[in-house]
Amino acid sequence: MEEKKRTALVIGGCRGIGRAITLRLAEDGFDVYPTCRKKSEAAEQLARDIRALGRECTILELDVCDRAKTRETLDAVFADTPPDAVIYNSGIAKDNLFVFMDGDEWDDVIGTNLRGFYNTIQPLVFGMLARHSGRIVVISSASGQTGQAGQVNYSASKAGLIGAVKALARETGRKGILVNAVAPGVIDTEMTKELPKDKILPLIPLHRFGDASEVAGVVSFLCGKDSTYIQGQVIAVNGGLVI
């Protein structure tokens, strides 16, 4: 019998950690739908790399802060059949001490990191409930577990995602939908290239930044056959930064 095609939607799936997740899920046998705000040559190269693996890849242009257009885009692709796995990886950082933080720095981070979760995940949940299956994996952060000075906005948004995961897991578990979070520490990506390594590395027991593929491996596990009794959990990938 022909194996059923599995599909994965990766919100923020064209760069950094998201790109690694998209590639890993394609290697696992998923046809993938990575999203980005605007298509680029890097996104098109990602699609070519995935098609070379023998999987289908459709890049979706999506601004997670635009609720109406996001729903329109998702309805056009997934109205009949929701994806088997959804990974919410959209996130930005605008760091500043809270005393100096302006309203835009707060609103932009909360809007992308937290409101974007509602805008992208909520339209897909009904279809998953009707099908009695699905995986939802949310990329949070070590900053959402412990808080970080200079990141009140970012920490609040990532902690909010953890709360959302735990509550949604309680709502959907009986219908066969698994909802979990992954909390990366400092991962070597474009987003962290300006960080002062000499000050950060002594705080990490493994004494190195993580690789995006190490986060992708945990997402792969949560979307696979060996994680069927894991629900509402936060799996840290941080080299011991938070213990």
Image (cartoon, helix red, strand yellow):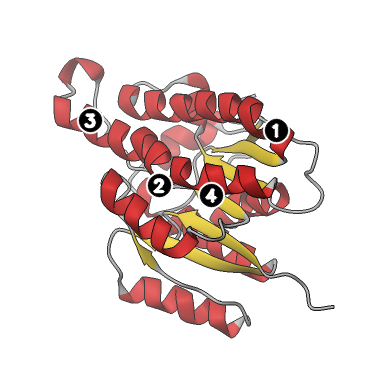
Q: Report how far apart the C-alphas of labels 2 and 3 lie in the structure.
A: 15 Å
Q: Is residue 145 left or right of residue 236?
A: left
Q: Which residue is mark 2?
A: 90
Q: Which mark is residue 235?
A: none
**Of marks 2 and 1, which one's residue comes earlier in the chain?**
2
Q: Secondary structure at mark 1?
A: helix
Circle 4 is placed at which residue position?
87
Amino acid marked by disc 2: Ser
- Amino acid on which disc 1 is placed: Gly
Which residue matches tag 1?
173
**Residue at mark 3:** 107
In the rendered image, which quarter contains the C terminus? top right
Q: Residue at x 34, y 26 (%)?
A: 151
Q: Residue at x 30, y 69 (%)?
A: 39
The secondary structure type at the circle numbered 3 is: helix
Check disc 3 and give the amino acid type. Answer: Asp
What separation in Å lies between label 4 and label 2 (alpha carbons)?
A: 9 Å
Give me the C-alpha separation between circle 2 and circle 1. Answer: 24 Å
Sequence-first disc among 1 and 3:
3
